[in-house]
Every structure is written in C-alpha cells, then in structure tokens.
C-alpha cells in the first residue's frame, strides 16, 4: 500500500463538487476492512492456492508475477483515465467509482467457492480459473482503490493533522493484515475458498461506509504562511528520500519472493496447516509494533544509519527465512523446531527492516514536500514493480541453484543493485548541492 499523497491538490478525480473533509474515523474504518480484502490477495493467495489447488512454490511465484504485473498499469493510469471520465460524465463522482469497485470485488470473490462447489467434473479447472480471475481483478481494482482512499485521507488535511492521520492510517491497515492471517488459519486446510468468499461479503459492508463519504476528496486550502512545503528541512533529507524510495521498491521485491514460497517453507518444516498463516504473520506483527515505535521515537530522523539498518535487517531476515528448512532435522510426523525458530527470527528481522524502510520513505516524503514526491497512483505503480520483479527473482534463482541459495543470491544482487544506484545518485546530489 502506498504512502498517501503529501500534496494532493489534484486527487484521483478532481474535487470540484465539494470541499468537505471526509471524517477520519470513516476513512480509517474503510481502510481497515479494505486492507483485509487486499491482504488475502497480496499476502494470502499463495496459502489458498497451496491448499485449494495444490500449488508448488514455483506455481505460486508465477501467480504472484502475473497478478503483480497487473497492478502496475491500473495504478499508474487510473487517475488520468478517471479524471477524463468525470469530465465527460458529470454524474460520476469519486465516491461512486469507489462504490462500484467495492461491489465488483464482492461479486468476483465468490467465483472460486462457487466453482469448487458446483463445478462438477470440471471443478478443479474452473476453480483455478476463478482464483486467477479473482486475483487479477482484485489487483487491478485495488490499484485504483487505494489512491482514492488515500486522497480522502489526506484531502483537506495539512501539517500536524496530516501527519497524525497518516500515522493512524499505517497502524490501521497493517493491523488488519495481521488479523486476516489469524482468521485464515482455521479455514485454510478444509475451506480455503471460503476465505475469499467471506472477504467478498465484507466488501458489501465497506460499500455502506463508502456511500457516506463526500462526493469527492476535499482539496487543500493553500495558506502560504502555513504551507508545509515552505518549512525548512535539513539538506540531508533530499538524498535520504531518494535512497528510501528505492529501498521501498526493494522491500516489495523481497516480500513478493518470500510470501509465495512461505507455504512450501512451512510445509518442509513439518508445521501443521493450522499454524502456517499465524507463523507467517510474524513479520506483519513486528511491522505494527515498529510502526508505533518509529512514530513515537524520532532519533532516526536525518541519520544515514537508518537505511543501512533497514536494508541489513531485510536482507538478513530474508536469508534466514529462506534457509530455515535446511537447518536442523525433522523426523516423520514431527516439526523441525530449530528451523521454525530460525524462520520466526528471520521473519522478525525482515519485519523490522521493512518497517524502517516504509516509515523512512513516508517521513522524508512529508518533510521534503516536493510535488513530484507524491504517493498516489505513481507510487502504487512503483510498488507494483516490486511485486513483479520479486517473483522473477524467485523463479530465476530457483532455476540457477536449488535449495533456496539461488533465490537468496539473485534477490540479493537485484536489491543491492537497486539500493546501490540510489545511494550513488544521492551522493551525486549531495556533492552538487
């Protein structure tokens, strides 16, 4: 999920019909429930495909690659397309577009369960097709959905109010994903497609709250003496922002390699299906905790150790998680305890690094306040690049070297190259300043 825009004078659809600011509690409630639905596709679909379709790690990487690539064009071009649409059709509002998305998702989410229950002899093929269709539609629709929600969140809010709103936004959406992982656990083994169906039903509830939003997100009232863009910030914030933006993409590369392979890793460790998603939620839980830490503690502001700390934690945690099945021993019917401990440790470290990366990108985007550093559709598209590159690293790494080592090597090279280029550009900017 992207960072909300810091200066959204032109939200996803131009706000010409109202300047009323959306109630924060309503936007956060929509965010919480909407994030549960998004989590099933971006974080949980690999577990559902594993249990419901018998997918291997490689098949899950292919699934992640395709739906991740779908996210990019919808996130990148949805804003211009919707603005053109509203100019030609004055009756269309941002709220109505968001309402239509909720209803579309509630319908498409029923496909896998219906195909599984009533598909007859063709049920396996129909169910697989329905799951792929659901994933593609969800990723495309949420590429439009989240820039709109973020525009309602930030529209009409500035300075301290905007910072507080974004802080709450981060805690709310990240907490929802943890809850989804625990809620999936009892259904995963025997009713995996019911999970998607229930989340589709939740989108009907979301639609009720969306219907209470203003027609369009509020515009900012520009007050030059209060405008955050004119507040001084240390010169080091600009190069740090460049590094953190690239690291944010790199973090999604790591996540989109790790998550599709998690069912295979946990299966090799001998874990029962009931514990797959709760243990996999370790990094998500750590992320919520450290979102609060980074919001309250400001000692990392302007410090160059923060990106190194974030990158190091991410890479080490990722490596530990990937090699965990190869550490320790396992007998028939038992659990590789040492491997599980290593997996939890790796996921925890990855969670800390991913949090530092996300929050660093968020903070410096707000502090610098450049118009070209917004985080609407363009930033969502960057995240989509991470969703796409990650599975490619996993697939190529698996072909190069089996047993997880190839995946670690290829992913590390890609991530370190991305961050290295960002650091080189940041240093060039610093020297020329």
Image (cartoon, rainbow, N blue to C red):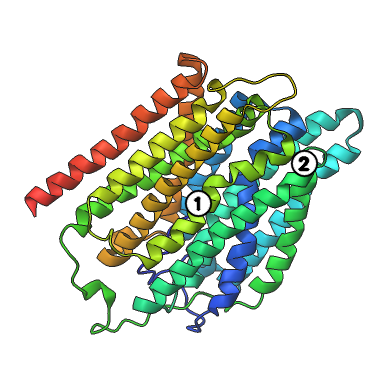
Residue 338 seen in the current view: yes
Residue of label 1: 286
| Residue lying at 68% horizontally and 32% vertically, measured from the top left | 271
Circle 1 packing at 10 Å, graded few (<14), some (14-19), many (20+), is many
Q: Is residue 396 left or right of residue 44?
A: left
Residue 145 seen in the current view: no
Residue 376, quarter of the rendered image? bottom left
Circle 2 packing at 10 Å, graded few (<14), some (14-19), many (20+), is many
* Residue 65, horizontal then vertical, whole percent: 54, 34
* Residue 100, horizontal then vertical, whole percent: 67, 63
- Residue at the left extreme of this rendering: 432
* Residue 15, horizontal then vertical, whole percent: 47, 75
At numbered mark 2, what does the secondary structure look like: helix, strand or loop? helix
Which residue is more in the foreground, 336 or 351?
336
Residue 259, quarter of the rendered image? top right
* Residue 262, horizontal then vertical, whole percent: 59, 34
Residue of label 2: 192
At numbered mark 1, what does the secondary structure look like: helix, strand or loop? helix
| Residue lying at 43% horizontally and 26% vertically, measured from the top left | 408
Which residue is more in the foreground, 219 or 234?
234
- Reply above or below: 161 against 101: below
| Residue lying at 82% horizontally and 38% vertically, measured from the top left | 190
Image quarter hosting the C terminus: bottom left
Which residue is more in the foreground, 314 or 54?
314
**Sooner in the amino-acid sequence: mark 2 or mark 1:** 2
Judged by depth in the image, the label closer to the viewer, 2 or 1, is 1
Q: Is residue 111 left or right of residue 368?
A: right
Q: Is residue 225 left or right of residue 153?
A: left
Q: CA distance from mark 2 to mark 1?
A: 26 Å
């Amino acid at each position: 999920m992207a960072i909300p825009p810091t200066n959204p004078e032109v939200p996803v659809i131009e706000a010409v019909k109202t300047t009323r600011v959306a109630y924060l509690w309503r936007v956060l409630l929509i965010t919480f429930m909407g994030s549960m639905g998004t989590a099933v596709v971006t974080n949980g679909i690999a577990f559902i495909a594993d249990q419901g379709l018998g997918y291997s790690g490689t098949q899950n990487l292919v699934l992640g690659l395709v739906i991740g690539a779908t996210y990019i064009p919808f996130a990148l071009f949805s804003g211009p397309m919707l603005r053109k649409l509203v100019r030609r059709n004055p009756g269309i509002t941002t709220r109505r577009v968001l309402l239509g998305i909720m209803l579309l998702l509630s319908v498409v989410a029923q496909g896998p369960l219906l195909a599984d229950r009533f598909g007859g002899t063709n049920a396996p093929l129909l169910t697989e097709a329905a799951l792929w269709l659901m994933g593609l539609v969800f990723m495309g629709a949420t590429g439009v959905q989240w820039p709109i929600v973020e525009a309602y969140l930030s529209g009409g809010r500035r300075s301290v109010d905007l910072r507080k709103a974004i802080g709450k936004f981060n805690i709310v959406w990240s907490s929802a994903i943890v809850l989804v992982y625990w809620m999936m656990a009892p259904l995963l083994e025997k009713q995996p497609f019911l999970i998607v169906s229930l989340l589709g039903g939740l989108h009907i509830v979301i639609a009720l709250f969306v219907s209470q939003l203003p027609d369009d997100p509020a515009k900012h009232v520009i007050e030059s003496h209060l405008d955050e863009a004119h507040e001084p910030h240390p010169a080091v914030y600009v190069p740090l922002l460049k590094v953190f933006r690239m690291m944010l993409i790199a973090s999604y590369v790591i996540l989109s390699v790790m998550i599709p392979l998690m069912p295979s890793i946990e299966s090799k460790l001998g874990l029962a299906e009931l514990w797959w998603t709760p243990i996999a939620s370790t990094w998500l839980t750590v992320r919520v905790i450290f979102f609060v830490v980074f919001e309250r503690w400001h000692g990392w502001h302007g410090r160059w150790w923060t990106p190194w700390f974030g990158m190091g934690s991410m890479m080490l945690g990722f490596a530990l998680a990937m090699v965990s099945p190869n550490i320790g021993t396992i007998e028939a019917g038992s659990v590789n305890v040492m491997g599980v401990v290593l997996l939890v440790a790796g996921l925890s470290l990855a969670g800390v690094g991913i949090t530092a990366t996300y929050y660093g990108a968020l903070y410096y985007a707000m502090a610098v306040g450049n118009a070209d550093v917004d985080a609407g559709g363009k930033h969502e598209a960057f995240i989509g690049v991470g969703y796409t590159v990650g599975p490619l690293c996993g697939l190529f790494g698996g072909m190069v070297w089996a047993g997880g080592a190839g995946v670690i090597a290829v992913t590390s090279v890609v991530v370190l190259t991305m961050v290295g280029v960002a650091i080189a550009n940041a240093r060039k900017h610093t020297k020329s300043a």
